[in-house]
Image (cartoon, rainbow, N blue to C red):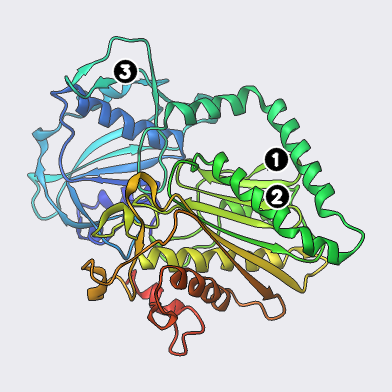
Amino acid sequence: MMNFIDLRSRLASGEFDFLIGLVEDEHFDAKSGKYDLIGESGKLELAKDVSSFANRSGGIIVIGAKTTDDPAFYGRRIDSVSLFPFNLINPTDYHNIIKDWIYPRPENVDVDWIPSKDESDKGLVYIFVPDQPENLRPFLLKKDVDPSTNRRRKEILFGYAERVSHSSDPVTVEAFHLMVRHGRENRWKEDIGSRLAAIEARLSESPEEKERKKNLEQIVLPRVGRSVEAAGLKEHRTYSLVVSPVDSTEVESILSSTPDSIASLLEQPPPLRYAGWGMETGDRAKLIGGEIRRVKADEYKVLDLYRDGTLVFACRADEALLGWGNRFGKTRINPVALIETTYMFFKFYELVLARLEPVINEARVWVLFHNLHSGGEITSLAPHGVDSTSQITDFYKRDAPENDYVGRVRIEIQNFDASRTAVLILREIYGWFGIESDKIPYLTTDKAAIDVERIKKLSL
């Protein structure tokens, strides 16, 4: 995927066929038609989208590109382009709404109509939001709309939106409150983090390695709860993975933020493919209590790396992430999302292992699901891949037998292989749902490893 600056340059050529097949992400949004600026809701939608890019690191909105959900990609994919005449959109109206609805006003936002090379009287519109100076953030919505009347609210209030993956959903009041508290009470949070880290350190320290092994689960599992809470996932259906060394060790460079540090890898984890499921959050790696590096996308996912080599990941197990693009909505897990996410977690841990000193011999892995019976709706999983008949009918689906689940696997680190380790975890997951291991899709012929090349080809 090209970056949003290059995408703008490509649009200027007037050749738009390259848009077909592109997938929305944290820097790119597609709209099939213009914003409805007659009603207040359309103005709010425009302001929300622009401010969400401004609160991240910029982006581009293309108007005239229709998208569809595709279970092979994490994001909506463009399947057609609809050109329209120059006079259908007035850029001045868009600029006025951005000025009136967003505070402070984002700098150098560009709204432009680009004529088609083949039909000069028709074209597309883009809204380009460059990366903004840090001292201007956050960008707040000065107005809100009552959905029951489509009229502007008169109460004193404001809103906040931040682009996460392919979505510009507004941040909840509770989440924004936590963000403000993080800024205003940084010393308090650091103090609490230091105390928790000190308690964990005391629990982790034992005269004998045998004692550490005995207490490892009691040390590690509470960390999952803290990660889930930190990302605002507690009330959602969640999927979590944890890997922790049995031996005492330490992550080198965890206190550093240099380009070659582990913090940089957390901020920009290597992807497997275009628009796939991975560890990316778009966040800066925060140092907490001198013991944890954290990146998170609030109410989507979180990745915590501890100084002792423990890696904790948690994400939504509904339509926001693991259930994305599924024809059966938020309660059916997308097998591509589950398998690719699991593999990418262990692929990232390969990078962590290279930075552990001393090297370790053994680790333990936990897999957890939470809230799978939430609201009386039960999360389900079906065998085989996204294109199989088992995914387009309820007949083959298997419901989660309980609301919560914890599975455990012990792994040897010598010759560690992310692909084979992921399969060990997937066997536990599919087995818990009542599905035989030979029905797990996207595996090699011997069913012992992830068929990585097959997953990569989903983006071709």
Disc 2 on helix, strand or loop?
loop
Residue 123: in sight, yes or no?
yes
Residue 261: in sight, yes or no?
no
Q: Which mark is residue 258?
A: 2
Outermost residue, right side: 207
Q: Position of residue 336 (x, y in %)?
A: 38, 67
Quarter of image, res 396: bottom left
Choose the circle earlier in sequence order: 3 or 2: 3
Residue drawn at the location 64% of the way across and 57% of the way down: 311
Q: Is residue 47 above or below residue 203?
A: above
Viewer-proximal residue among 337 and 393: 393
Q: Amino acid at mark 1?
A: Ile
Q: Amino acid at mark 3?
A: Lys
Q: Position of residue 70 (x, y in %)?
A: 26, 61
Residue drawn at the location 66% of the way across and 72% of the way down: 410
Q: Which mark is residue 57?
A: none
Q: Position of residue 62 (x, y in %)?
A: 25, 44
Mark 2 touching mark 1, by CB under 8 A?
A: no
The residue carrying mark 1 is: 288
Viewer-proximal residue among 81 and 170: 170
Circle 2 crowding by C-alpha within 10 Å: few under 14, some 14–19, many from 20: few
Q: Is residue 45 left or right of residue 120?
A: right
Which image quarter is the N terminus in?
A: bottom left
The residue carrying mark 3 is: 143
Q: Amino acid at mark 2?
A: Thr
Residue drawn at the location 33% of the way across and 38% of the way down: 128
CA–CA distance between discs 3 and 2? 40 Å
